[in-house]
Amino acid sequence: MTVLKVDLSIGTVAEADEETVGGFVPVNADNDNGSTVTHHIPATRDFDTDGYTDDDLVPISLGLEPTTGLSCTLRLRKVEGGRDRIKVWETTGKVTEVPLPTTWTVGTDTSPATLYVEGLKEGQALRDIDLVLEYLQSGTVLCDDKVKATVMPVLSNLVAVAGPNRPDYYVGPDSLQMIWSDGGYDEPTITITGSVWNVPNPSGKLSLVQHAKNVGLLADGASAINADGEKWKWDFAAPYGGIALVDGDGTGPTWNPFYPDDDPSANLYLAIDRPRVWAGHAEIFPPTNKATQIDLRTEFTIYAVWQFSDTVYFLGNASWSVRYQGALTNNAGTVSFTEGSGGPGKRSQGDSYG
């Protein structure tokens, strides 16, 4: 009697952990192919090209016993149960892809002892991919072995928790005349939390990048109408109008992605934001006993990114906004802001992973 055995393993994962823990495959996006980088984004992602040596592929080992005297077929297949996507190659040089499912005729074909798995798209949950090695005779599976895998990093949380959005005029310690979105200098408007699963992740860390734009809600898209009836639009100071998504030195309407993590070991990022607009523009600052009507919405998108050495990869986003609506009044030299009847702006807590 012949005892058949097939064996499939991934990376350095122990046999007992192959289905309960599984292997972790990094999303292949750290620019090993050396393409041009603009605003921290490579022109070509590693997973979109081939023909170069890449150290982010994870080996899988294929075994069959006995190795002689068999007449059968060996088949390797994958089941992508979630969002994760993978590709299999003969070598880390990414020259010859092994399309799955693929079969080898035992005794005729030379089945590989090792292949290499590339992560094309990160998952939404752990262990969503099955890799299965099967021994078939006349089309019937006689025995098999399975390993589970996850393409990392997996974004587990991205939430923007907002305050009441009650704008108010306040002169800060820098003596700038500001309308703050939540009542004053020390009042945070939004708390943003992002995290990924705390498992073996690619080299790098979780960071947040924020993009913003201003939308005037008065006639003709104006943000303010001064005491003389002149319309004026708020925008970000040059060169940040119409800025690229990931850019800059940490100022302007985007956050620089290279901020430290709150807790790198837990892959957690926590941030607060206090949006405000400068009310000291000569075009809108009201003369004595005059008022300027203001209605402006600033729309934000916060992006969770995985930060490699000099590039980032986008994992998900959440949107939120603040509204400055009311009258900026100068009453005999005392300046105040009276909130309008429109109330606070839209304060969404939204997730979009992908």
Image: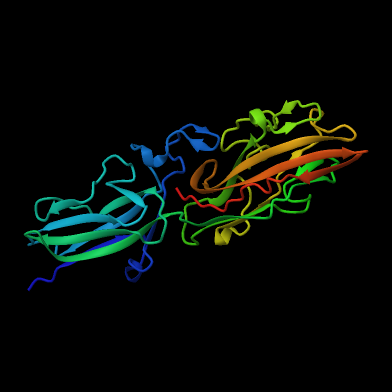
Q: Residue at x 29, y 39 (%)?
A: 95
Q: Position of residue 139 (x, y in %)?
A: 9, 59
Q: Residue 211's image quarter?
A: top right
Q: Is residue 251 visible?
A: no
| Horizontal arrangement in the rendering, residue 64 relative to residue 130 (left or right) | left
Q: Nearest the camera: 310 or 233? A: 233
Q: Nearest the camera: 23 or 251? A: 251
Q: Residue at x 82, y 33 (%)?
A: 285
Colour mapping: rainbow
Q: Residue at x 71, y 46 (%)?
A: 341
| Horizontal arrangement in the rendering, residue 37 relative to residue 56 (left or right) | right
| Horizontal arrangement in the rendering, residue 105 relative to residue 99 (left or right) | left
Q: Position of residue 59 (x, y in %)?
A: 33, 54
Q: Position of residue 176 (x, y in %)?
A: 83, 39
User: Furthest-bottom residue in view?
Assistant: 1
Compared with 279, 164 (above or below) is below
Compared with 315, 23 (above or below) is below
**How many discs mark residues in the rendered view?**
0
Q: Nearest the camera: 276 or 131? A: 276
Q: Position of residue 92 (x, y in %)?
A: 34, 45
User: Furthest-front residue in view?
Assistant: 341
Q: Is residue 97 visible?
A: yes
Q: Nearest the camera: 93 or 331? A: 331
Q: Which quarter of the rendering shows the N terminus?
A: bottom left
